[in-house]
Amino acid sequence: MFTPSGIQSREIDPAMLLNMWAHYLDDERDKDKMIFAGIGRPTYPVNSDFAKAAMEYWKHFVNQDQGLINLETGHLAIDYDLPAGSLKAREKMARALSNWYKTPIDADELIFSVGGSSALRMIFNILNKTSPNKKTITTLPYYPFYNHPSHHNKLHFINLLQGPSCRLTAAAFEAALQSIDLKDIGAILFCDPNNPLGFVTDESEWKKIAEIIQSLPEEIPIILDEAYAELTFISKHTSLLQLAPTLKNRIILLRSSTKGFSASGERIAVIVCSNPLLKEALIEETIFSYAHAPKSLQYAYSEGMLAFSEKKRALLASSYHKQVQYVLDRTNKMGILFQKEGYKIEGAFYIIVDLSHLFGNKIDQSASKALGYSGTICTDVELCYSLLFKKRIMLCPLSFFGADPNAGLIRITCSGGTTELSLLLDRLDAVKTEL
């Protein structure tokens, strides 16, 4: 694989490399509109309470001649903060999260991070130090960042593509445990609501899973990636944290402003961790990574979460639900919707389609600049790059999420609005069997 500048790609995240090529091609103004449906792309208006709080923070540093001062420090400079974040911001976020999870969460259990990916990277670094050569149990398909080579993660899968149901169940979790020695388990990682499958684990399954976890060694941490917690379509998300309070000391929970607040470009997230040793390790990683998260964003995120009502959440989720349903209906009529028992989109904004009927076509000649070779389309990566260069649509191969590259499964991001999504599906429908 090569970058748009012609340099061989080594450890660039494959989805980010695909995105780089899409933006590079988008600069060709004389061509058709590029449709970006291959990355997690929030399009709902940025959370207004988040934006207002950010403006409120910064207004104290403008017009210095008017005597405006930093409310926290009493002077006009922005001082360093605690590695975990401002105590005031953490206290506000603790109140907001305690209300969300109906579980007491203290300010001392929170650490602000520079985006969700940074938080995950710090967690993985800790696991590699505390549990070297041990494995992390997670679902397959998985969020690609979990398996980036730089993290040195060893994943053991709950394979939802080969199992009887395309969603997390206690039975599937238990089956995965049967094929690993308990001494080899370093952590358990759940992404819920799930990316890329879109399922939301229900309360009854969480309770069964909690019972199984209770029987495992206490030193095994449970990582809850809840980046899409705001985007559930049936009802508000239910977390393992609130259903199994006895597991709280083993849980590292991650929330992010990226999707729920449409603030992906601002890079602010929060980690919930009540285990003193794990929290101390996270603080150490924070210090060496970036000292602390930006103070303005801590303030904005905590204020936004405090004001985030169920009504606001439901409006947000409904906006994406309509787009997901539109793409589901059309791809089903087109005969390309992924078919498997239990496949039901209940959260996030992705769907899976099967484009394996396009295998056997020639790789688009222009796409060879990115792939580094030409020939016949045999994998989902070759297919997506051919669609990118020839049809100007960016889709994401499910092999980036651990699926079989020869299965032809593709993830579509359903967030660009019905006009753009209609154009995307029109282009796909026009392809039929020949690129």
Image (cartoon, rainbow, N blue to C red):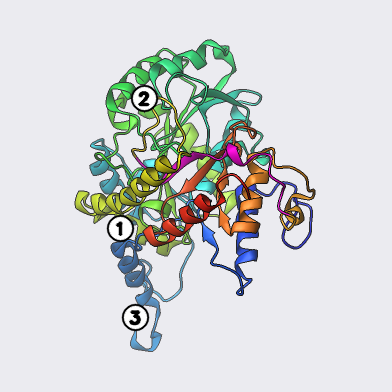
Residue at the location (28% across, 22% down)?
Answer: 204
User: Residue drawn at (52%, 56%), measured in percent from left and top?
Assistant: 427
* Label 1 CA crowd tier, 10 Å (few <14, some 14–19, many 20+): many
Using the image as rendered, state which of residue 187 and residue 200 is in the foreground: 200
Observer-side mark, 1 or 3, equals 1
Residue 152 to residue 331: above or below: above
Q: Secondary structure at mark 3?
A: loop
> 10 Å neighbourhood of mark 2: few (<14), some, or many (≥20)?
some
Nearest to N terminus: mark 2 or mark 1:
2
Give the alpha-carbon distance from disc 2 to disc 3, as whole Å: 46 Å
- Mark 2, secondary structure of its residue: helix
Residue at the disc numbered 2 = 247
Magenta stretch bounds: 347-364
Amino acid tagged 1:
Gly
The location of residue 222, given as percent across then percent down, is 45, 28
Residue on which disc 1 sits: 304
Asked if labels 3 and 2 touch by Cβ distance under 8 angstroms, the answer is no
User: Which residue is labeled 3 in the image?
Assistant: 68
Residue ID at (61%, 52%):
387
Quadrant position of residue 422: bottom left
Give yes or no for residue 224 being in the magenta stretch: no
- Distance (Cα) linking label 1 and label 3: 23 Å
> Label 2 amino acid?
Leu
